[in-house]
Image: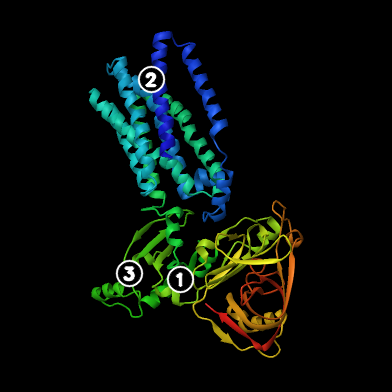
Amino acid sequence: MGLNEFAGYLAVAAMAFLTGLLAAEYGPRPLPFQVGIGIAFIGLLLSVLWVKDTGKHVSAEAANSVVSLLERPFLDTSLRHRVLGSVTQAGLVNNLNDGMLWGLLPVLLATRGFGTSSVGAIAAVYPAVWGLGQLATGKLADHVDRKVLLVLGMFLQGFAILLLPFVEQQHAYIALSATLGLGTALVYPTFLATIAAHTHPRQRAESLGIFRLWRDLGYAIGALLTGLIADRFGITASILAIGVVTVLSGAVVWLRMPAERRCLEAIDLKKWLGRRDIRVVDVRSPEEFASGHLAEAINIPVDRLLEQALPAKATTHRDRVRQRRVAAPHKPRSCCAIWASGEPGGCAGERWDGVDLQCMKMRTALTLLVCSIGFNASAQNMAVRPTGAMRNTMFNGQLSALISMDSTAVPGTYGIGPLEHLQGELMLLDGHCYVSTDTSDSAMQVVERTDVGAPFFVQQHVAKWASVALPDSIIDLRSLDDFLTASYAERKTAFAFKLVGTVEKVDVHLVNVPRGTAVNGPDDAHAHNKHYSLVDREVEALGFFSTQHKAVFTHHDSNIHLHAITTDRSWMGHVEMMRFDPRTTQLWIGLP
């Protein structure tokens, strides 16, 4: 953002200087306008020949974005969203005072006796510092709390404007002009970076357009407002009024916008999520976690985490310090605490050793712990985590990947779902991801790979499986569904289960929707299914049970959803029918 804004405003300054020279030498018309037309044509030519469409980049980012869609983009960007609304009003005020400066600053300087060259020099410092400064402030916005940059920038502008009527010397005006330029340089690329970070990729352009509508309306509002005030109360009153409004705008950002602190963006987190010895732990309640979470996160409510980490209540300061040091039974080599405000996309992070109780008690924040595998969380069964929903794929045509196996396939994790674009089936067994597809000769091909994704997926981290004896009456999927429902429905808890043994018969299918085919219902999704059967083979079936997730990861008429794979990992698919002998088949469940 800083490079883009730097290039644009540096060009504005350069062309203002160039056209001034041309106008002085050849007159205001037509040569300066001819130069402008020529530059516009060059820009058009460069856009046609060199600028590439970014639609595929947007689709790729949208598939893995954890930022929620805005319910009402115009209202949310303009006002309702705490981050977006704060940025939008600051953008409007920034351009409001900018419009005032271009109109009233030359008049103020002229009334103080400054000549044309002095006025030009003072006025030129402002856009020069603004343009050049964005080279640094744009990069700065990627590494520090953007809220700090916005507040500091608006305050610098406001106080510089308030001082304008009270100085006399040229060097003082140049210093204030430079301060105004620095303040604007701090906020201008940060506006756009903040909007981009807090909007879903599919709504980013729309939200940026709404922001820029209000921001650029600031020019018109500033011109009208300052003119009205100046006519009624004088130039000094008008400048002071705009200075006060600018300071108040900075205060609004300070008070309303959630802090980001040292922000860890998704791209920075990838290097952690790609490691097999890393866990992301979301410590909100199960209900908050179910409403939306990072695909890679496992859920340990903060109370449960504290209870396990701190079995005895601390009575003295020394006890509390000691408990902080022994909070993890096996102290991790490194740990990163990340917490985000309730606003989508907000984040903050810092490294620490042990467990920071104050951070973890922030119940209104989304708190994540990124820790080495030595942390105690890896020894527990976690809650089932669905991503996407079966109904959205079947009825709404959501076929692109919402979760990537690259970061999901970690030891102890089990999951099932369809391959992206409904072109096969996925099965995750103890961190090993198996992909089953139909080849051109209608043969099944199973490979282990993680560079794939799923439009919907259900997974669970299971550290310990519990064996459950099967009654003699449990011989197929229908009776297994009834058995699990009778035994576990009252718990209202989803869990993974495994059936391991030699089955009498198992029928599976692979979804195989051709690329580009529209899916508007289950018939479209299953029209191209490939069907396979096995008899008397040893298989491992992974399933998920829930009475609360129909059409999310179980079918509307069942509480279970299974995939099966042979022990040699050469055959795998979505189970349609299975018949087995309970005496030779073992049931394992992974209750959280």
Please give the label number shown on residue 17. Answer: 2
Sequence-first disc among 1 and 3: 1
Give the position of the N terminus as an image quadrant.
top left
Q: Position of residue 190 (x, y in %)?
A: 41, 42
Mark linked to residue 301: 1
- Which element is circle 3 on? loop
* Residue at the image point whose x is 44% and y is 44% from the top: 193
The answer to whether marks 2 and 3 mark residues whose Cβ atoms lie closer than 8 Å is no
Is residue 80 left or right of 511 when viewed as pictured?
Answer: left
Residue 345 drawn at (x, y percent): 47, 53
The crowding category of the residue bearing disc 3, from other C-alpha atoms within 10 Å (few below 14, some 14 to 19, many at least 20), is: many
Q: Amino acid at mark 3?
A: Gly
Residue 354 tag number: 3
From the top left corner, tell me how far across and down residue 476 is, in percent: 71, 82
How packed is label 1: few (under 14 Cα within 10 Å), some, or many (20 or more)? many
C-alpha gap between disc 1 and disc 2? 61 Å
Label 2 or label 3, whichever comes before in sequence order: 2
**Front residue of 235 and 424:** 424
Q: Is residue 292 visible?
A: no
Position of residue 127 relative to residue 368, above or below, is: above
